[in-house]
Amino acid sequence: MKNTDNPGGGISRRRFLGTTAAAAAITMVPTSYAFKNKPAAEAEPMASDKPNSVFGGVTIGAITYSWRSMPGGVENVIKYCKEAGVSAIELMSNDLEDYLGAPKNPRAAMIGGPRPAGPAPAGAPQGAPQQGGQRPAGAPGGAPAGGSQRPQLTPEQEAAIAKYNQEIKDWRINLPMAKVEAARKLFNDAGIDVHIVKFSPSRWSDEEIDYAFKAAKAMGAKGVCEEISEEAVRKLAPFAEKHGMYAIFHQHMQFATKGFSYDPFLAVSPAVMMNFDAGHFFGSTGIHPNTIIEKYHDRIFSVHIKDKTGPNTDPANTNQVWGQGEMPLADVLLLIKKNKWPIPCDIELEYEIKPWSNAVKEVRTCVQYARNILM
């Protein structure tokens, strides 16, 4: 990939690694992440076993989907956060529900995958691996070996899935919220704030959607995340209003479609907020993400950050190691810092991880990269 001019205004990988050796040794102090109109604690080089990834007033978090290639579970997520220096997360619901004792989903076993861990994020790119389990051998990205099409299920398998669907519904609507609060305490004690839970529940029953918002609130989150669509927005907005929370919607490459706008979705309810994926936006349109952030900053709850090539580069719209792509990471972070907007920026790790590394190490490098920009 040709990227000699670094049009994104970022920091080269070589320069970054040369200027952050000291930062890598810092052990962070805890922060209590504050949402709208509350000051955020700053990272200081003090001894503590609790992370703090607030730099220059900007919260650098991570979506736990970033660790999809590693063993899942609440305890592991907390461990990964500590090792990566992350103090705020968008939590995939699979790990939470597994910890809470949800019935096991038989789908993964049926296609030769890892332990059942619930569905991949709704709307994720085809072949996206399931959160909470490791990728099956010979199947890139967690897709079934031999192609992206799932095998035809037998009548017995279909019956097992129908049975599971009823079991998980019954489990959800009868779950005591005290159990969820106990899970929240684990994160609180570790100095980690859960600002979003990604349940992706728009196709669930009304009772289960209600559960999703109650559980997210019990986790201390401000909202429930879903992939953006007119149907999903209209379905979830009333539940968000009922619970005094946000229905937060993530986009992929929709902005590359002529005429796409946030405006019709935002008009549905003030409880509708956006999880703006700056990487997908830039990679598919080539337009600077700050054009969207500046316009909609008061309706953007969080930003997903990643490095990518643009649509006119070969290869086009492709995930890159931070500092090797064209996505203007520094511009995005510095805009939010300059305006003191309370918008967390969550790392979504999607580039290829080399055999000598792992997802936790790479997220930590991304955290340090962001810190180098902001501090």
Image (cartoon, grey):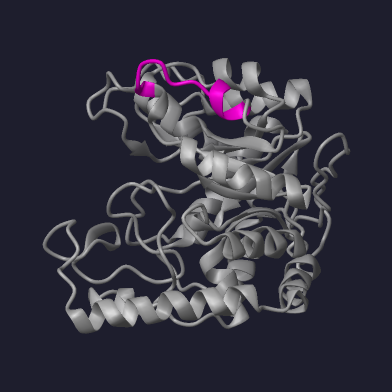
Q: Quadrant of residue 292?
A: top right
Query: 259 left or right of 338?
Result: left
Q: Is residue 371 magenta?
A: no
| Residue at 59%, 44% in the rendered image | 346
Q: Quadrant of residue 51?
A: bottom right
**Whether residue 108 is visible:** yes
Query: 174 left or right of 356?
Result: right
| Residue at 75%, 50% in the rendered image | 242
**Whether residue 22 is visible:** no
| Residue at 22%, 25% in the rendered image | 314
335 versus 276 height, above or below: above
Query: 223 left or right of 251?
Result: right
Q: How many marks?
A: 0
Q: Nearer the viewer, residue 65 or 200?
A: 200
Q: Position of residue 206 (x, y in %)?
A: 58, 59
Q: Position of residue 175 (x, y in %)?
A: 67, 78
| Residue at 75%, 68% in the rendered image | 190
Q: Nearer the viewer, residue 195 or 274?
A: 274
Q: Which residues are magenta?
A: 256-266
Query: 194 left or right of 327?
Result: right
Q: Position of residue 251 (x, y in %)?
A: 47, 36
315 versus 346 height, above or below: above
Q: Residue furthest left?
A: 146
Q: Nearer the viewer, residue 60 or 97?
A: 97
Quadrant in the picture for the C terminus: top right
